[in-house]
Amino acid sequence: MKNEICAVLFDVDGTLADTERDGHRLAFNAAFAEFGLAWDWDAELYGELLTITGGKERIRHHMEKYVPNELRRSGLDDWIADLHKTKTRYFVALLERGEIPLRPGVARLIHQLREAKIKIAIATTTSPENVTALLKSTLGEKSPDWFSVIGAGDIVPGKKPASDIYLWVLDQLGLSAQHCIAVENSENGLIAALAAGLNTVVTVNDYTRQQNFSGAALVLSNLGEPTQPFTVLAGNAQGRKWVDAEMLAGLNG
């Protein structure tokens, strides 16, 4: 039966929480200051840099485009890795202070999927440390254990829009794409999920709202709550006001 949903695969940054503008961006800038760099990623520049997937890749792209002389550093790869590790420390500290909440509907849907015995998994390019810190700070200390698979960071060679992370998670779950659905927020994420054969629900944010979401099963403002219905941007929500397991099964029909 095609519309039986066995697992829901969640992206993290911008999907579970609005982590980018007032989370990762601030952490990058704090790391730059600690390293004595006169770099400042304002909100507009960071929006541009978000087209590059992966933090280390984003740093390198910034160097190539804006400060090419810095590429001559000896041990460049290790230096970028250390800079990114420092950024992660600042980001985790933000999470631990409770400064980055989950987006509307996320906690409700996760709890409902667990009650319905539907597996949940993570498919992201952010680091495992970031994922764990976000989950613990918003859903509780034991919440990482709720996820059957957490695919994160450099566990696969190709980052989104490559489908590698989704294919890896599906393999770990032992499930075919037709019995799963993905939740994403960006064009790169959607491309990756579709390439893995996954029906995909997109919940946009300020950075991704204008991107191309052709092929998505549904494009929404967020996952919605009974007291805070989502806005449908593309697709047919069949009169529903918030995403739940029944709705996802219908989308996969």
Image (cartoon, rainbow, N blue to C red):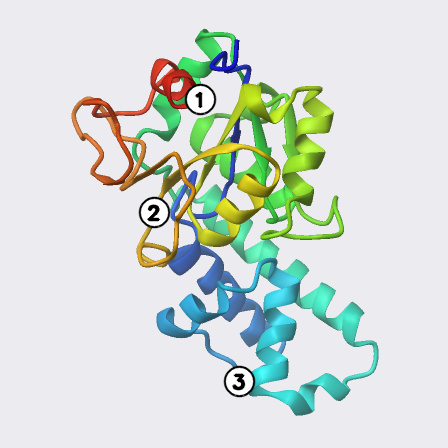
Instruction: Give above or below for 184 relative to 53.
Output: above
Label 1: element kind: loop
Q: Is residue 74 left or right of residue 151?
A: right
Mark 3 or mark 1, earlier in chain: 3
Q: Is residue 9 left or right of residue 228?
A: right
Q: Amino acid at mark 2?
A: Val
Residue at screen point 59% across, 61% down: 87
- Can residue 36 be spotted in the picture? no
Q: Are marks 3 and 2 in contact (CB under 8 Å)?
A: no
Q: Amino acid at mark 1?
A: Asn
Q: Is residue 34 left or right of residue 215?
A: right
- Nearest to the observer: residue 74 or residue 184: 184
Q: Is residue 129 left or right of residue 24?
A: right
The residue under label 1 is 252
Q: How many marks?
A: 3
The residue under label 3 is 38
Residue 164 location in percent, x, y?
A: 69, 44
Q: Which mark is residue 204?
A: 2
Residue 97 location in percent, x, y?
A: 43, 44
The crowd level at tag 2 (other Cα within 10 Å; few <14, some 14-19, many 20+) is: many
Residue 79 location in percent, x, y?
A: 75, 72
Mark 1 or mark 2, earlier in chain: 2
Q: CA distance from mark 3 to mark 1?
A: 49 Å
Residue 72 location in percent, x, y?
A: 76, 88
Which quarter of the figure has residue 15? top left
Instruction: Give above or below for 121 relative to 111.
Output: below
Which quarter of the figure has residue 21? bottom left
